[in-house]
């Protein structure tokens, strides 16, 4: 957590993945803005760095979404993903978020 204000939160992350589009690493930054207690806005930049030799590039995305808190440690998020380079793709996704 880089910033944990009452209405705005800024996080950075680094991770690793296997399978899917390829093996590699993830990195990014997420900004959450609480509008109401039942609605929030999310903006993020996400980058994947692949270690596979047959990969065409490292996609970078801008993500914008809406966050619906369900419980203290759980929420539902709906995102639109915008490509920031040629290796990236556009899309829409959603899912549950669990906070530890």
Image: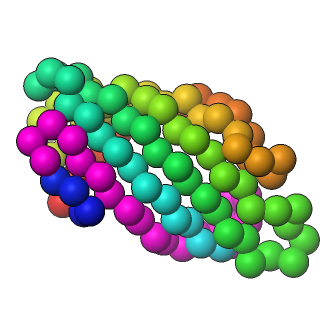
Above or below, 62 against 49 in this view is above
Q: Position of residue 95 (x, y in %)?
A: 41, 36
Above or below, 25 against 40 in this view is below
Q: Is residue 27 left or right of residue 89?
A: left
Given residues 43 and 72, the one toward you in this image is 43
Q: Is residue 28 left or right of residue 54?
A: left
Residue drawn 48% across the image and 32% down it = 64
Residue drawn 22% across the image and 56% down it = 3
Q: Is residue 35 left or right of residue 72?
A: right
Q: Position of residue 1 (x, y in %)?
A: 24, 63
Given residues 29 and 100, the one toward you in this image is 29
Given residues 18 and 6, the one toward you in this image is 6
What range is drawn magenta here? 5-23
Q: Is residue 4 left or right of residue 25?
A: left
Q: Position of residue 28 (x, y in %)?
A: 49, 59
Residue drawn 26% across the image and 28% down it = 40
The answer to which quarter of the image holds residue 81 is top right
Q: Quick check: can you spot residue 92?
A: yes
Above or below, 14 against 39 in this view is below
Q: Quick check: can you spot residue 95?
A: no
Residue drawn 80% across the image and 76% down it = 52
Q: Position of residue 68 (x, y in %)?
A: 26, 27
**Quadrant of the rendering where the C terminus is positioned:** bottom left
Q: Is residue 6 magenta?
A: yes
């Amino acid at each position: 957590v880089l910033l944990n204000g009452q209405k705005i939160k800024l996080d950075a992350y680094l991770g690793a993945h296997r399978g899917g589009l390829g093996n590699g690493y993830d990195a990014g930054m997420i900004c959450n803005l609480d509008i109401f207690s039942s609605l929030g806005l999310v903006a993020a930049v996400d980058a994947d760095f692949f270690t596979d030799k047959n990969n065409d590039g490292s996609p970078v995305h801008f993500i914008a979404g809406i966050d619906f808190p369900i419980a203290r440690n759980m929420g539902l998020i709906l995102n639109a993903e915008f490509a920031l380079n040629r290796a990236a793709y556009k899309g829409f996704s959603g899912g549950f978020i669990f906070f530890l």
